[in-house]
Amino acid sequence: MQYRGDAQLKRIIRAYDYPIFIAVVLLCLFGLVMVYSSSMITAVARYGQSMDFFLQKQRTSMIIGFIAMLMTMIFPYKAYANKKFLMTMMLGIAGLLGLLGIVGHTAGNATSWFQLGSRNLQPAEFAKLAMIIYLSAIYGKRQDRINNIDKAVIPPIVFLVIITALIVFQPDVGTAVVVLGISGAIILSSGMSLKSLSKLIGILLVAFAVIALGAVVTGQASELVSKERVSRFTGLAEPFSEENAKDAGYQLANSLLAIGSGGVTGVGLGDSVQKYGYLAESHTDFIMAIIAEELGIFGVIFVLGLLGFIVLRGFMLSAKCPDPYGSLLLIGISSMIGIQVVINIGGVTGLLPITGITLPFISYGGSSLLLLMLSMGVMQNVIMRMNLLEEKQKKESKISA
């Protein structure tokens, strides 16, 4: 009995995807180094803390994140598809997002966090994984009713609209865009017919039109299209112009200066100039600019190469997964990382407006890192069970032959 148990444990351990695991570990460790390098001046000058203030907090978040990842690696992903669990999860996330308006902590003109002692919790981060699990379960488990308007189209869209609206009104448009992008990727991959997709899009357009009207009536629209938010678009066009360089285009101009200064080999780890108060969010939204400045194109390629590897491998494995629910989970998690990378790099390089989306595994942020590690654990659990099933089928085919 002991031998059987040991053999089964070894099979399970071998079934995990170690290339993805190694890529995640490398990104987290590299991110820890870059958080320290990019935040040491900010910690002292702006917050009056020691130089390693953000390093210590990120290290703690990373340890908690790895523990969370190991737990979700072990926990069977199919249990998340339980109807009671799904409803509790979605109602809980919606409740937390709604509660922010009452007891939330405001920073950067957005009420997106709960203040928990010395740490902040951002519910919108966990709304991403909640939507991935919910939509994957609904569309994966209802393949026979995928085009049923009452069962597979309306209920998921109700939650999608509610969650997105609550995030937009924080306001956090960037995260809302990520949630919509993830949801779109899952729905497009679900096998739904074009007719049902067109109905779904129509329902969404009507819903968001109603939300927009409500925003105008309640006065929220003025906050969503405030001068500061509009300036992100005006600064995008000409960040170095005399009018924008000191205001709307200030962050982007300094980001581009950092990238240009780095060149091919960089100015050296720890030797960034832009982190000396020029680039305000050097350890969060604009950490890639510091990587480019200090480590040059090689540092950028290292980060983007590992992130791209995780995303592409996730998509490739989703195509092999025989379980529609598991396949959609892989697509959703891979899409989440890919969309965040595109939005973050787009903002840093001036290809997209600055939205406050962090770079996965690299940027400082406890909620973001915990969410990513939980997601990686779910991904590993899907892959592990897929590999075990494939191994079992191979053995059975050999025996029958």
Image (cartoon, grey):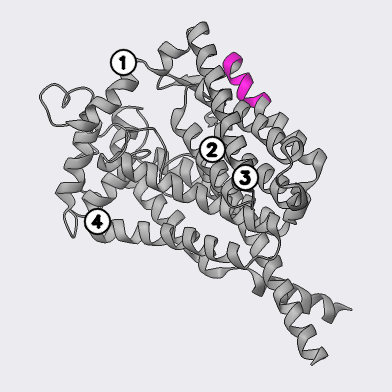
Q: Name the mark nearer the viewer: 1 or 4.
A: 1
Residue at the extreme front of the image, as rendered: 195
Q: Mark 1 or mark 2: which comes first in sequence?
A: 2
How far apart, in angstroms, are the residues tagged by discs 1 and 4? 35 Å
Kindly identify the residue that appears in the image at 20 percent across and 48 percent down: 271
Give the residue type that dot 3 points to: Ile
Which residue, given by chain and number where applicable, does mark 4 sit on? 295
Which residue, given by chain and number where applicable, does mark 2 sit on? 179
Nearer to the camera, 186 or 298: 186
Q: Is residue 195 visible?
A: yes
Give the residue type that dot 2 points to: Val
Give the residue type that dot 1 points to: Lys
Nearer to the camera, 236 or 44: 236
Q: Mark 1 or mark 4: which comes first in sequence?
A: 1
How far apart, in angstroms, are the residues tagged by discs 4 and 2? 32 Å
Which residue, given by chain and number where applicable, does mark 3 sit on? 132
